[in-house]
Image (cartoon, rainbow, N blue to C red):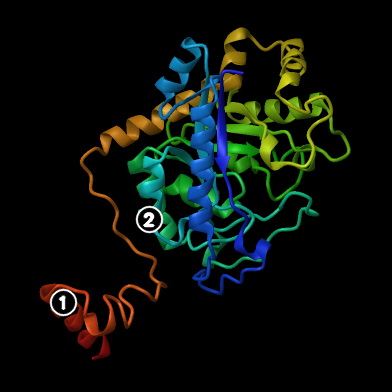
C-alpha cells in the first residue's frame, strides 16, 4: 500500500440522540468532535515512521519515493460543518482534501440517500425541495472548488449528484460506492450518473471507487469476483480511467470474503489480472485515477487563485446577529460597529 485516506467522521446528530430540528440548527458538538478527530489523525501521522502527510497529489507520490505511505485526510458528512462555510476553510488548512456532501443524514447543504450500514436499504424521507442540493449547498460546492477540496458524492441522493454535475465542471469523486445496475441500493450510483462521468465533451472527469461492504455489493454473493463485477460494470459505463477502490475499512462491520484487511489486496488484484486488466489499467485502479482527479481539482483551484472567499451564510441561522450579539446592548462592540448593528436592527424591525 502506497497511500491511504484517513476519514474524519462524527455520527449524525440523530444517531447520538440530538434532535437537529427542522432547520438543522441544533448540531451538538459535531464541530468540536471533528477538530478532535483531525488532531488525532495528525498526531498519529506525526508519530508513525511509516506515514507521511500529503496535502497534494504530488506530495502523495513523493511519499512513495521516500519509502513512506502517503496519509491524506478526508471528511464524511456536511453535518460536521456547523452550517458555516468558514468551518470548511479552516478544515482545509488542517489538511482536509475531500468532503462527502452528506452522510446518512440530511444537512443544511445536501440530501442524503440514507442506506446506513446495517440498514435494510430503505431511503431517507426527503427533506429539502427537490431532494438534492440546497441553495447553501450550491455555495458550498463553489467554495470547495475554490479551495481545491474534492467533492465526494457517495452517500447522497441521485438528485444531489445531478445537481452537482449540473453546477460544476471540476472533477468529482465517489469515494466508496457501488453500481446500482448490479445491486439496487440507495448507496449505489445509477446508470444515468455513470454516463455523465468522463473526459469527452459534456462530461465531468471523476472516479467512482467501489466499496468493499457486502451490503452494497451483494449480500448473497459476498465474493471478490462479485466486487470486480461492480468495478467492471462502472468501467463499461465510463472507462477504466474512472474506476478505483474505496475499502471503507474504518467504517464497515465486515468486508468481502477474502478481503478482511489490506494484506489481502493481492487476492483482489489477481482477479483483475485473471480478467485481462493491463498493468497501466491496474495502476489507475489502485490510485492513479484518483490522483488524476485530485490534480484536476488542484488545477481548478489554482485557476481560482485570487478569488475571494465565499461569505454566504446559512439563511436559517438565527444568531447573526442575535439580540445580544456583541454583549448586552452592544457593550463589547466598537462604537462604529455598534451603530451599524443598531441601524440593521431598526431596519429589520421596520
Q: Which mark is residue 98?
A: none
Give the distance between the C-alpha atoms of the residues marked 2 and 1, in whole angstroms. Answer: 24 Å
Tag 2 secondary structure = helix
- Where residue 187 appears, as percent x and y from the top left, is 68, 47
At 23% across and 91% down in the image, what residue appears? 350
Picture residue at 76% right of the left edge, 20% below the top: 264
In the structure shown, which secondary structural element does the residue marked by tag 1 occupy? helix
Q: Is residue 172 left or right of residue 111?
A: left
Tell me where residue 135 sits by quadrant: bottom left
Q: At which x and y percent is residue 162?
A: 52, 49
Q: Which mark is residue 85?
A: 2
Decide if residue 186 is in sight here.
yes
Against 221, residue 339 (above or below) is below
**Residue under the point 32% across and 36% down:** 301
- Badge 1 is on which residue? 340
Picture quadrant where residue 3 is located: top right
The answer to whether any part of residue 200 appears in the image is no
Amino acid at each position: 500500500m502506497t497511500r491511504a485516506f484517513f476519514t474524519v467522521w462524527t455520527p449524525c446528530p440523530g444517531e447520538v440522540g440530538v434532535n437537529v430540528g427542522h432547520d438543522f440548527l441544533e448540531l451538538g458538538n459535531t464541530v468540536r468532535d471533528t477538530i478532535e478527530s483531525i488532531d488525532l489523525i495528525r498526531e498519529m501521522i506525526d508519530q508513525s515512521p511509516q506515514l507521511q502527510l500529503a496535502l497534494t497529489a504530488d506530495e502523495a507520490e513523493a511519499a512513495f519515493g521516500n519509502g513512506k505511505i502517503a496519509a491524506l485526510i478526508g471528511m464524511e458528512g456536511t453535518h460536521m460543518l456547523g452550517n458555516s462555510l468558514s468551518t470548511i476553510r479552516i478544515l482545509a488548512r488542517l489538511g482536509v482534501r475531500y468532503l462527502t456532501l452528506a452522510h446518512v443524514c440530511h444537512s443544511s447543504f445536501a440530501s442524503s440517500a440514507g442506506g446506513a450500514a446495517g440498514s435494510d436499504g430503505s431511503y431517507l424521507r426527503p427533506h429539502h425541495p427537490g431532494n438534492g442540493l440546497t441553495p447553501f449547498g450550491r455555495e458550498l460546492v463553489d467554495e470547495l472548488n475554490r479551495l481545491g477540496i474534492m467533492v465526494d458524492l457517495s452517500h447522497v441522493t441521485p438528485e444531489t449528484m445531478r445537481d452537482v454535475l449540473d453546477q460544476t465542471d471540476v472533477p468529482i469523486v465517489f469515494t466508496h460506492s457501488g453500481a446500482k445496475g448490479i445491486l439496487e441500493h440507495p448507496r449505489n450510483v445509477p446508470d444515468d450518473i455513470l454516463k455523465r462521468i468522463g473526459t469527452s465533451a459534456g462530461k465531468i472527469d471523476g472516479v467512482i471507487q467501489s466499496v468493499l461492504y457486502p451490503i452494497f455489493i451483494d449480500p448473497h454473493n459476498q465474493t471478490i469476483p462479485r466486487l470486480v463485477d461492480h468495478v467492471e460494470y462502472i468501467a463499461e459505463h465510463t472507462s477504466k480511467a474512472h474506476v478505483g477502490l474505496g475499502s471503507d475499512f474504518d467504517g464497515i462491520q465486515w468486508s468481502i470474503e477474502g478481503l478482511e484487511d489490506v494484506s489481502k489486496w493481492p487476492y483482489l488484484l489477481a482477479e483483475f489480472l485473471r480478467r485481462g486488466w493491463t498493468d497501466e489499467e491496474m495502476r489507475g485502479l489502485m490510485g492513479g485515477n484518483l490522483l488524476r482527479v485530485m490534480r484536476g481539482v488542484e488545477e481548478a483551484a489554482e485557476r481560482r487563485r485570487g478569488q475571494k472567499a465565499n461569505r454566504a451564510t446559512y439563511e436559517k441561522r438565527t444568531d447573526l446577529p442575535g439580540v445580544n450579539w456583541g454583549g448586552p446592548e452592544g457593550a463589547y462592540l466598537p462604537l462604529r460597529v455598534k451603530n451599524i448593528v443598531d441601524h440593521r436592527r431598526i431596519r429589520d424591525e421596520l
